Each structure stands twice: as C-alpha cells, then as structure tokens.
Image: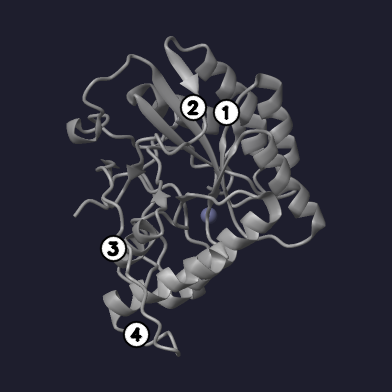
C-alpha cells in the first residue's frame, strides 16, 4: 500500500513539474511539495570520487602534494559560517562513510567497526544474491546507517534522464526496504553532487530527492582511497589531515573488493579519531547537517 501511494505521489509530482504524461488513467493526486531543507555546508573544492565510466570526463582530482606528508588539498577555511549550526555544542562529530558496497570486504569492515564499537554509514548500491542480502541486513541490524548510492552505479544510465534516475532510485530504495525493512532516507550521488557526468542538471535530481524527502550527502574529508596505488598510510594521513578542520567531518571511504588498503587503514583511522578530544564517531541520521557540494537551498 505504501508503495502504491508513493508511486502515485511521484507521478503527480512529475506531471506538475515536468509535464510528462506518465499516468495513463489520469489520476490526479495532490502533489506533495518538497519540504524545505536547511542549507548544508557548501563546499566545492574536494572531489574525492572518481568516475568509473570511460564515456564521461573524469572529475578533477584534488591536488596532491608529494613527499612523505602526502595529503589531499583541503579547505583553507574550514566550514563556512552559513553551514555551521548557530551554537556549536563543542563536540566534533565524525561520520565514517563507505560508498559502493556491499562487497567481499564488507564483513571485515563490519567486524572492525564492531570491535571498536563504532557506527558508520554505508551508501550502498544494488547487489543481488543471498550473500549480499545477508550483508545489507547485517549493516542495518548492527545499527549502521544505510544510505543509497544508486542501484546500478552506471553513470551513463543513471544520469541519462530524470526518468532513468528516478527508476534507479526507486529500484534501490524498494530493494533495500524488502531486504532490510529500512526505508533509506539518505543518498550519495555517484561522483558526488558536483559530478560532471550527468546529462540532467543536478539541481533537477536534487529537487527530485527533496520531493522524496531524501537528504543527499557529499563529503568534506576525502581519503582518496580510490586512487590507484594508494596505500594505507596515505589514506590515514589524508583522513587525519581533514578531520581536525571540521566540527562535522564527513569522511569518504570505499567498500570494494579492490580497496584493501581502506580496510587496512580503518583501525588506525578509528583509533586516531577516538584519541581526539571532544570528538565522537557517529552514523548519519536525520539530524545530521549535510555536507553538500551543490546547495539544495533555493
Ligand atoms: Zn561510488
């Protein structure tokens, strides 16, 4: 029932916003306006997720300084005043986020998180099969947050049109609900909200997510763990260079079979963050102030 109502809401919203005749029987429910959302932290300088389609131009890579102290270029000013809560409570919140899972590495990642009593956020893609279903469930049942990262993760299909994006979105959201019982409320765009791969203006996709009451999250701490040849020590250094700059630090890591250095780096990252004063590692919730490379404020 919920799915049916949801589908109807979407169709009427589509019709109003884009004039597409998607509903054959002419049913006309009242459109639900997207809730107004607060302004996220707008920060455009870091792009930590590389595009994986050869059809599209790769995003610019953050500058890397050479030598032993290799690190990604980070914001010079920390969070903008507009993105900061008016009264900071003095506690730094660090969000460890993993894109692209589940994978053959996920159970190891979950074991590590468990051993430190840490909750993280997994922006997952659509992986079929019972072994993956078990992993989705383990993520949810362990108290981590499940966010969405597209079903297909294929840029050429996902970003072809609003229709293809919304179809992919609904497929993943429904799949996760059927698998875990969780309606995910969080999204991370493949390539980030400032990706250059989308044939649809990103503002349109953001509007769509707003209407779905989905909050999208980018990141302000890039580990660069998706760079070829990166090792554990550089990943740790990248993260620990970025985290102290923010009251709300959102770290981008990847959960993938070929990202073993990320798994190796994770214990040190957690230990070093846990050693910081007035700092907690928490999962993304509806109260989390999103970091957004493209603002969704109107
Ligand atoms: Zn990704």
The color scheme shown is one colour
Q: Residues within 10 Å of mark 1 (few under 14, many from 20)?
A: some
Give how far apart the Cα atoms at labels 4 and 2 are: 49 Å
Q: Is residue 69 above or below residue 46?
A: above
Mark number displayed over residue 233: 1
- Which of 211/126 is in front? 211
Element under disc 3 = helix
Quadrant for the C terminus, please: bottom left
- Label 2, on which residue? 237
Q: What residue lies at 41% left-to-right and 46% top-to-bottom? A: 217
- Tell me if residue 159 can be seen: no
Give how far apart the Cα atoms at labels 1 and 3 are: 37 Å
Left or right: 7 in relation to 247: right
- Label 3, on which residue? 203
Give how far apart the Cα atoms at labels 2 and 1 are: 6 Å
Q: Position of residue 241 (x, y in %)?
A: 41, 26
Q: What residue lies at 45% left-to-right and 90% top-to-bottom? A: 24
When asked about the image quadrant of residue 201, the answer is bottom left
Q: Decide: marks 1, 3 in contact (CB < 8 A)? A: no
Mark number displayed over residue 20: 4
Give how far apart the Cα atoms at labels 3 and 2 are: 34 Å
Return the disc, 1 or 3, that comes first in the chain's sequence: 3
Q: Residue furthest bottom?
A: 24
Q: Position of residue 44 (x, y in %)?
A: 28, 47
Element under disc 1 = helix
Q: Decide: marks 2, 1 in contact (CB < 8 A)? A: yes
């Amino acid at each position: 029932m919920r799915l049916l109502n949801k589908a109807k809401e979407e169709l009427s919203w589509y019709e109003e916003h884009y004039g597409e005749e998607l509903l054959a029987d002419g049913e006309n429910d009242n459109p639900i306006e997207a809730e107004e959302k607060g302004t996220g932290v707008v920060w455009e300088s870091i792009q930590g997720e590389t595009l994986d389609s050869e059809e599209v131009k790769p995003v610019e890579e953050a500058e890397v300084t050479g030598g032993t102290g290799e690190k990604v270029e980070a914001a010079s000013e920390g969070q903008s005043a507009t993105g900061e809560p008016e009264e900071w409570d003095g506690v730094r919140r660090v969000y460890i986020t993993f894109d692209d899972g589940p994978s053959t590495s996920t159970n190891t990642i979950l074991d590590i998180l468990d051993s430190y009593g840490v909750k993280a956020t997994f922006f997952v893609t659509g992986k079929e099969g019972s072994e993956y279903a078990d992993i989705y469930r383990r993520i949810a049942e362990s108290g981590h947050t499940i966010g969405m990262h597209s079903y297909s993760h294929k840029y050429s299909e996902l970003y072809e049109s609003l229709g293809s994006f919304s179809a992919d979105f609904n497929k993943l959201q429904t799949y996760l609900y059927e698998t875990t019982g969780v309606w995910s409320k969080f999204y991370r765009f493949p390539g980030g909200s400032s990706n250059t791969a989308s044939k649809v203006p990103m503002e349109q996709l953001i509007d769509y997510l707003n209407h779905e009451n989905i909050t999208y999250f980018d990141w302000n701490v890039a580990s660069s763990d998706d760079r070829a040849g990166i090792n554990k020590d550089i990943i740790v250094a990248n993260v620990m260079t970025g985290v102290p700059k923010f009251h709300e630090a959102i770290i981008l890591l990847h959960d993938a079979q070929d990202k073993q250095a990320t798994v190796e780096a994770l214990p040190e990252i957690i230990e070093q963050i846990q050693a910081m004063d007035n700092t907690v590692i928490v999962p993304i919730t509806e109260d989390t102030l999103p970091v957004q490379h493209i603002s969704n404020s109107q």
